Amino acid sequence: MPANFDLSALAIEAVLPNNKVLYDDKGLPSVMVRIPKMTYAELGLGESTDVFPAFIINGQEVPEIYISKYQNVVQNSRAYSLPARDPKTSITFDAAISACSTKGAGWHLMTRMEWALLAHWCKHNNCMPKGNNNYGKDTTEEARYHAVPATYGTGADAGKIFHVLTGTGPLTWSHDGTHEGIWDLNGNVSEWVGGIRNVYGELQVLVNNNAADASHAQTAASDQWKCISAVDGTFLTPDGTGTTSNAVRARYKNNNHWEWGIDTTADGTDTYKGCTLESVTCSEDIGDAAKIILQALGLFKYDNTAGAYNGDYFYWSSVADERVLYCGGTYGNGSRAGVFYAIGGYYSRTYAGVDIGFRSAFVKLPTV
C-alpha cells in the first residue's frame, strides 16, 4: 500500500484509538470503528451474559466487528468509508452487497443485527445520535446548522439541503458523542442493511449474524433465509408464501399499530404503514425466545418507559411479495428518523434512489 496511506492511518489511529484504517483487496483505505464483543446485559437488554448475536457468525463467536465510520462512497465498484464525501445513493440492495463483498473476505454490507447492536448501545448509554433529518439539520437543532451541504433538492424542494458531506456534522451526530464515533446513523440517507427481509409480512433473517459472511447468499431465492418460530425461537424453512406454520409475522392492528404474531390472514389493507416502535406489540402467540430475537433485531421494544425510543418509526407491510430493510431515515424524515427507525415494507431490492445509501462492515471470519 502507498506510504501516504500508512501515514494517514498512523495519524488517525493516534488521535482516535478506537478507529482503525482497514485496507481492501486493492490496498485502498476505509476508516472503521471497532466494536468489541458484548453481551445482552452490556447492551441493556436484561441480565443475560449470553453474547449478543451480532458476534455469532457460522456458529462461532468473534471478538470484534468493524463498522464504517461514515456512510459509504463507491470507487472502482468497491465501497469505502471516507470523511467529507457525498454518500453513494441510487444503488440497489444487491449492488450494495456486491460493493462490500468485492473488497475481500470478511467485508460485507452492514447487517440489521449489527445496526441493532449500535442502536441498543446508543440507547443504553443515553447517547441517541442526532443528524441531518430536516434538510441539513436535526429537528431538535432548528436554530443551528453545522454540516457541509453536498446536494440540494430540485422542483418543489429547490434550495433545500438534501445530503451533507459525511462526518461534517456536530458531535451530537456521532453515535457515542465523540470524534471516535460512527456518524450519520440518524438521517442524511437511509441505509440498506443485510440479513433481513419481509415476505408477505413474514419476518425472514439469516441466522444470527451469518449475513456477515458473503458465502451465505442473500439473493431472493437463497436457501439461507429462515423464519423465526413463534413457539420456541428456532429457525424454520419458509414456505415461500408468507404463511409458514407458526412463523413470526406482522399484521396491522386497530388501524394504528403493527403486531407480531402468527396470524396468516391479510385483508388487503395491511399495506405499507407505520407506527412508533413503542407502539409495536406482540400477540400471546409470541413466546419469550422469539420475543428476545425481535428485541435483539430492534423490531420490538424491551424498555417500556414512555419515549424510550425517541419516537422512532417502524414501517412494514403484510401484502408485499418481498421487501428488504433500510434504516436510519433521510434528510426529510424529521422526528421519525433515528437509530431505531426501520422500513421493511416499501422498497424492493431493485430500488435505487437518492434517499438510500449503505455502509460496509468488516469482521475477521471465524475458521472451522
Image (cartoon, rainbow, N blue to C red):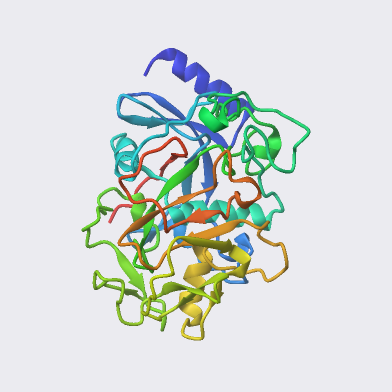
Residue 263, image quadrant: bottom left
Q: Name the one closer to the observer, 113 or 365.
A: 113
Residue located 51% across and 55% down the image: 342
Residue drawn at (43%, 13%), measured in percent from left and top?
A: 3
Q: Position of residue 161 (x, y in %)?
A: 59, 29
Q: Nearer the viewer, residue 366 or 19?
A: 19
| Residue 272 x/y as whole percent | 45, 60
- How many marks the image carries: the answer is 0
Name which quarter of the figure residue 133 lies in: top right
Residue 51 seen in render: no
Examine the rendered structure and indicate whether residue 281 appears above or below residue 351.
below
Residue 341 percent coordinates (x, y): 56, 54
Task: Measuring from the top left, give residue 296's x and y in whole percent.
Answer: 51, 64
Residue 62 in view:
yes
Q: In the depicted view, which residue is nearer to us: 347 or 6?
A: 347
Q: Quadrant of the C terminus?
A: bottom left
> Where 42 falls versus 160 (above or below)?
below
In-image side of 44 versus 341 (left or right): right
76 relative position to 314: left or right = left
Q: Is residue 216 above or below residue 106?
A: below
Residue at the right extreme of this rendering: 143
| Residue under the image location 28 percent in, 36 percent down | 102
Examine the image and state in which quarter residue 91 appears. Answer: top left
Residue that lies at the very extreme toward the bottom in this rendered image: 284
Instruction: For the N terminus, give its image quadrant.
Output: top left
